[in-house]
Each structure stands twice: as structure tokens, then as C-alpha cells.
Image (cartoon, coloured by chain):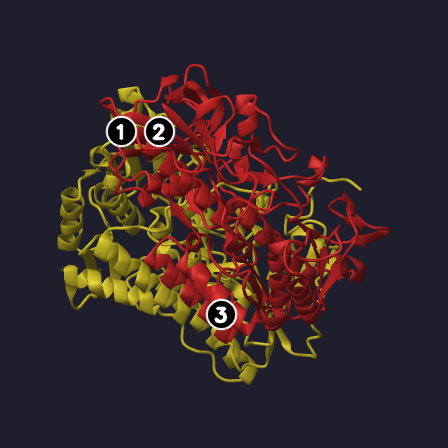
Chain colours: A red, B yellow
Amino acid sequence: MSTTPTVWRSHSGAAAGRVPLPAATGLHRVVIVGGGFGGLEAARGLSGAPVSICLVDQRNHHIFQPLLYQVATASLATSEIAWPIRAILRNRPEITTLLATVVGIDAEAHEVKLDGGQTVPYDTLVLATGARHAYFGHDDWEPVAPGLKTIEDATTVRRRILLAFERAEREADPARRRALLTFVVVGAGPTGVELAGTIAELARDTLPRDFRNIDTQEARVLLIEAGPRVLAGYPDDLSDYARRSLEALGVEVELGRAVSACSDEGVVYGERTLPAKTIIWAAGVMASPAAEWLGAPADRAGRLLVEPDLTVPGHPDIFAVGDTAMVAGPDGKPVPGIAPAAKQGGRYVAAVIKARLGGAKAPPPFRYRHQGSLAQIGKHRAVIDFGWIKLRGALAWWIWGIAHIYFLISVRTRLAVAISWLWIHARNQRAARLITQGGDEDRDQARR
Amino acid sequence: MSTTPTVWRSHSGAAAGRVPLPAATGLHRVVIVGGGFGGLEAARGLSGAPVSICLVDQRNHHIFQPLLYQVATASLATSEIAWPIRAILRNRPEITTLLATVVGIDAEAHEVKLDGGQTVPYDTLVLATGARHAYFGHDDWEPVAPGLKTIEDATTVRRRILLAFERAEREADPARRRALLTFVVVGAGPTGVELAGTIAELARDTLPRDFRNIDTQEARVLLIEAGPRVLAGYPDDLSDYARRSLEALGVEVELGRAVSACSDEGVVYGERTLPAKTIIWAAGVMASPAAEWLGAPADRAGRLLVEPDLTVPGHPDIFAVGDTAMVAGPDGKPVPGIAPAAKQGGRYVAAVIKARLGGAKAPPPFRYRHQGSLAQIGKHRAVIDFGWIKLRGALAWWIWGIAHIYFLISVRTRLAVAISWLWIHARNQRAARLITQGGDEDRDQARR
């Protein structure tokens, strides 16, 4: 018997062939790929419909992505923003959840192809596979400048941030110490702004008393943006307030400068070379490979172009929602890649499927309703744009917090996150500051 | 600039030479290696003493090891049982905490040697480096049968347990499915008993409604022990009660059978060969390499033999406490490798150092006081032996819970763990069921 631990990849070893799903007894089979906001909302919306559902995700958990940056900055623990998908769906006996990686789709045979050779048949397919980071042709930057889309991204970034301080504490050489205490965030959208602000707070408020050789308040945090503004999609005055808030926290905001090189030594932006040991990428996303699976038209970011009813052209039985799809909003601009948009898409698709099965008239075309934009910069500083009203400062910050807690999946997690935040608020103590490393040799290669 | 991320190992890159510690201004320099129970208690005991302290650990966090099995069985999250060491010590300005791996000791030069070539000078050295797993000469079993000493061990075991159920859900072949649903714990000490009982509860109470193709209640959990009893160090009647409780949970207890082979296919024990995809090792520990660093005499488990005052023979300036040391208890048997023993040792060493510095008489020889043995088997089932009284059943279980919460490090964590446990108790829902994989390519090689 060999001792090579080959069995721990979720996609190895399962026999090829159709997945042994419970007998569908003639029900319409819906397969949902992706257990994120779009996929889960579609599953929810199909409650009570005469369907059997198979939901497939390459991870076993749903992540509350808007708070992923808080795991990355050691403000929340991973378990506070992630829940097992099959536990979320446990009260839906008609839903089978599978941990698997989709490797392709056979649209003619109406089958989804999984790792290991298994296939899952469908009558209707919903693609809600989200996005991953884009490096504008510089994929070699990814190892030194990780993005923030998965739990593993978040713990990797967290580890790097905390290790940088640890190494600086031991570093005798002043130049190397300065590089260790220099943190660069690339991209000033909401994620970049939230990251930069929180790292600054970590260095300024949480860590100073923990170190003896270094003054963590001397850490430099830079937010580098190629465009002319932070929070480009927000109204000018809120964008301006965000920039001033970042600067008040000590963040150096560099606008109008694109990053032209990233390495483990630092970054080159504009004409400057900056030694920095920690770089985080928040500058671009592209869709999952769904369009490639179908050989269907996609935009420059890889998003599937969809019909007004969110189906893929030529495939009325295949829907795409969320970051996977390019949907035109009411103002002609693409619907933003945010959680509410994915949820609205998922809800809509469920309504269309239900209407079809019930013989009812098809709902009108999908119409995205922008409910508001929120971004937190730091303690007591946030911006909210509800369209009819704009808020900033401490009031916006409290509303931001309540809204995020409200949208968390379970009562228990709301309680846990509320306690964590109150603790940070009262004492500046961040409890989730663990540096952990991967245990198994095996790695799930199909993470992306 | 290369893009190879070489900088993320905590021990690479720091310049060789003495660590730049804050100027000691003539104070007696104490170096404590290890931030576990023994090391932290020594640090606490030295409060107010005229010393400067440097505490070194290869991880940035202190782990509450008695509850590590709960992370491994997805009942608690990692952040609920681990805290950053430097945060624990933040209010002690005379203590510098370093994240570093000790690679040796130069007892002549009175220096501790760290990874990367740095050294730390000491006047007094306290070794509290703990233990790691022992495989009785079969180190090749380690990849397939991980132990439970670190956070990474716990998340590895958790991942394997949860992945086994996930893969079984997709597995069409009945024999392979059975092997995936067979879990083996080797070693029936407290850790093994707690693991086996909790996995059985997970399969029986938490998971059944989450799966559709498999009946998780059909999972087999085996606890294999070479000796004649579970909980060998406990009174006979408590040991018996523990065994019957395990069996009531559906655990198959195999006594008097030693494991002779482990592989990713299963185990061989006694004369049986059992296909099992998940094996957890709880059968033996050995000390950290402290004895090797000193070239000092050690017992068969690698533990340093120490004088009655816990110093290493021939090195009155070097102390060893906890699992690192072999200390004879009042009954002549070795002091057990449990948290209270390490804490008593740490406290004692601090008292000795203080007495020396104050010119006072040396305290009497270290005398271990056994306060009691506790083990939890499952919900409402625990055993406690206080010596003068023995408890079992639900009362023992409540006391077990309260005692463990009491000894947790911080108020916030006590609250978090209490909530998690109440949730499990009320709803059988375990929230910490995340399958995560390592992010960075780099691995901290010196973990063991």
C-alpha cells in the first residue's frame, strides 16, 4: 500500500460517469453552478417549484465577499464570513449539493462535465460562477500580488501582512525594514479603499503596543490607482471624502499612476520604483471560464453576453447571472459586479424558470435596480450613495455595519460578527490575527 | 526583479547576527523558547522581576491545545482557540516577542541560534518547546495519519474529514464509498477518545440532513488502541464508562490491537486489514528537539532529564518545563504531558529565577500537583477524576465545559466559544465546517 496521500483532492478518484444523483422521478432537472450570491439566490427562488436541483461548487462554503477584506486584515475570522453550502440548503430535500470542479459543458448532450470524468445532466442550467482577478496580461504578478476573491486569498494576504511586521521586528537592516513596513494596494475601487484604510488602522491603532523594535505607526500604506479618482463609480463629493479620509488615516493615495511592474522587491508605478514587500491586487477582475466552456461570445473581461432574459444566445436552457454575465443596466452601462446585482439576477432566473414550468407568461426582461453603493474607509468613516441621498462619516459607517450584519447568512454569524466589531471598536483589538500555513501537501489545483 | 515569492518564510532573509533587541540596560536577560502553556506561564510569573525577556516561538499564536480536537471536528473555529502571543504580552513592555525557529543552542556562549543565522543572547534560558507526534519508527505514516498538535494539524484533519463525506456523496462505487465513510482514530488517550466521539456525533447528529446520496449515519468510526483500556491513566470505572459511552455513540472500540501499517488505503491492526480513507494519529508524542540542541540526556520520548529544580544537568542557567522535560511526579511516575503540568512548571521556574535575582533562598524542589483528569466523550458524556471525587455523565460534561471556558485566554474568546457550544448543543449545528486549502506556495519548513 503506498503512502502517497493522493485522495485528498476533491476531484480525484471518483469514478467517471454520471454522478449518482437521487432518482429524479421525472422532475425538471436544474443544475446551478456556483454557490455564491447568484447561485444561492436562484436556489432560494426555486423553492416550491416542481424541480430537482443539483448545485455544484468547487468549494464547500459560501463566502460573504464584501467582508473578505476583513479576514485579510485580521479583523474577522474565516468562519465568520463563510458557511457550508450544503448546510445552508439542508432544509431543501430536492437540492443535492456537490463539491466538484466544472471542467466543461456539453450543451448538445445537456451535461455539465466535472473533474474526474463525472457528468451531471440538466434540463436547465444556471451559471453563477463569479469572477477571478485579472492582471492585464501580467499573470506572473499574481504570486507576488494576490487578489481577494476566495478565503485562501484572504488568509494569504493576512499572513503576508502579519509576517511583514514579524520580520521587520527581527530585521537589523534599516532599508529592508522599511521595505517590510511598506504596504501597497493596487486599485482604488471599494475593495482597494477598504483594504488600504484597514491596514492603516491595523498599523496605527491595533499593533503599536505589540512590537518593541519597530514602531508600526511608521508603516507606509500606499493606494495606487491608474485612474484620476478613488471610488470611480461614486459621486465626486463622496469620492473626494473617501480620499481625504484615507489621507487622514495616513494612507498615501497615488492617482493617475498605473503599476507597470510587480515583484517580490516592490512595484514600479508611474516613474517611481518603490521597495515594498507586501502588494495586494484589487485592480481588475475577469469572469470565470464559463464563456470558454460554451464557446459563446464574451466581452473583454470574459463575461458571457446574455439576452434580456439572462439566457445565453442560442441556448434558451442556459442562464448566466452575476459576475459571470455581461448584462446591460438601465443606463446602458454594464451592471456592476456586486452582490446585490448577482442576487437580483438569481432571483429573476428562478422566476423565469418557474413561469416556464407553470405555463405562465414569461416575466419582462431583467431590469437591474441599483440600491446603493457603500464603502467603508475606516473607523467612523464610510460613504453611502443611495441615489436620492448621500451619506458619509460616522452615520454612514453605522449604517454600513448594520447593513452588512443584516445580510449575513445566519443568526449565529450575525452575533459573532457583531461581537468582533464591537470588540474592535471598543478596544482596537483584532482577534483574528493568526498566521497559519497550509497543512496538506496536496493542493486543489482547480481553485480558480 | 524576479517574481519568485521567496520572502514569505518567516525565517528567510533576516540578516545574520544578533537580533536587534531593545537595549537591555544591564537587566538580567531571560529567553523563553515557546509560547505555549509553560512558556507563557513563566513569562507571567516573571512580572515585576528585574529582567528583560525575549520570548521566541515558531508560530505567532498560542494554542489552547485541549480544544484543538474541536477545530479538527469542525465544532470550533481556529480563531476561537488561538491568540497572537505578542497581543497576550502587549502590556509587558519588558517582553520582546519574536517569530522565529530555534535551530540550536550555544550553551558556552549563552546564545540561542535562530533560523537565518541570527542569535539571541541569554543569562537564563527557559525551554518550553512542547511535543510533536511520534510514530514509533514509522514516520512514513505521518502524511496519511496526521496528529493533532498544531492549528495546521487541526485544519488538515478537519479538511480530510469533511472531504471524505463530500467525496462519498459523489462516489458511485459502493466499496470506495464505504472506505470514504470509514474513519480511524489511533490511540485511546483523552485526545483519541474526544476525537472519536466527536466524529461520531458529527456523522450522526450534524450532517445527516446535508447529504442526499449518502446516509452519514452509516459512517464507521473506529478507535484502535494497543493497550487493554481506553483512557489508560484513569480509574477503571471511568475508563469503562468512557468505553460504553463511545459504543453508545456508535464508535467501534478495538482494544489490545496495535496498528502495524497505515497507508492512504487504510490500516492494518491486529490481523485485520481495514479500508479507511481517513486516519488520525493520537497514539504517541515525543518531545521537541531541545535535548538535541543541548546534547543533553533524554528519555525514550526525547524529553530532557532535569534536576529537581527543573534545570538541565550541568546547565544551571537553563530550565526545561512542560512536554519538553521529563520530570518525576510525587508518585515516581513521569509528570503527565498536560496543560496544568506545563503551567505549574512555568510558574515554578519563574519563582526560582525571581528568588535568585532577589538573593532569596531557592524554593523547594518542584512538586507536581495533579488537579484532576477530564475527558469529554460526547454530548452530556464526560469523565472527571478529581482524586477525592469522580464524576461522569452530564454533570461532568457541564463542569468540563465550564472549566475549559474558564481557562481560555480572553473574555472575548470565552464568549465566542460559549456561543459556539450553545449553538451546537441547541441545534446540532457546527458552524466551523470550512474546507480550506493552503494559499501560498511557500511553506514554513521548520514547523516541526
Which residue position is annotated with label 2?
Answer: A30
Using the image as rendered, state which of residue A243 and residue B257 is in the foreground.
Answer: A243
Pinpoint residue B329: horizontal percent, then vertical percent.
33, 63
Q: CA distance from mark 1 to mark 3?
A: 45 Å
Pinpoint residue A222: horizontal percent, then vertical percent.
72, 59
Pinpoint residue B49: horizontal percent, then vertical percent.
55, 81
Which residue position is annotated with label 3?
Answer: A398
Residue B309 appears in the rendering: no
Which residue position is annotated with label 1?
Answer: B213
Same chain for labels 1 and 2? Say yes or no: no
Pinpoint residue B376: horizontal percent, then vertical percent.
24, 55
- Classify residue A352 as left or right of residue A203: left
- The residue under the point 28% across, 43% down is B199
Q: Helix, strand, or loop for circle 2?
A: strand
Same chain for labels 1 and 3? Say yes or no: no
Rate crowding at label 3 as few (under 14), some (14 to 19) or many (20 or more) other CA atoms within 10 Å: some
Query: Mark 2, chain letter?
Result: A
State if disc 3 and disc 2 touch (CB < 8 Å).
no
**Three-letter amino acid code at disc 2?**
Val
**Three-letter amino acid code at disc 3?**
Trp
Look at discs 1 and 2 and give the one toward the viewer: 2
Query: Mark 1, chain letter?
Result: B
**Three-letter amino acid code at disc 1?**
Asn
The mark nearer the N terminus, 2 or 3, is 2
Q: In the drawing, what numbered circle is on residue B447?
A: none
Check the image and report above or below for A265 versus B305: above
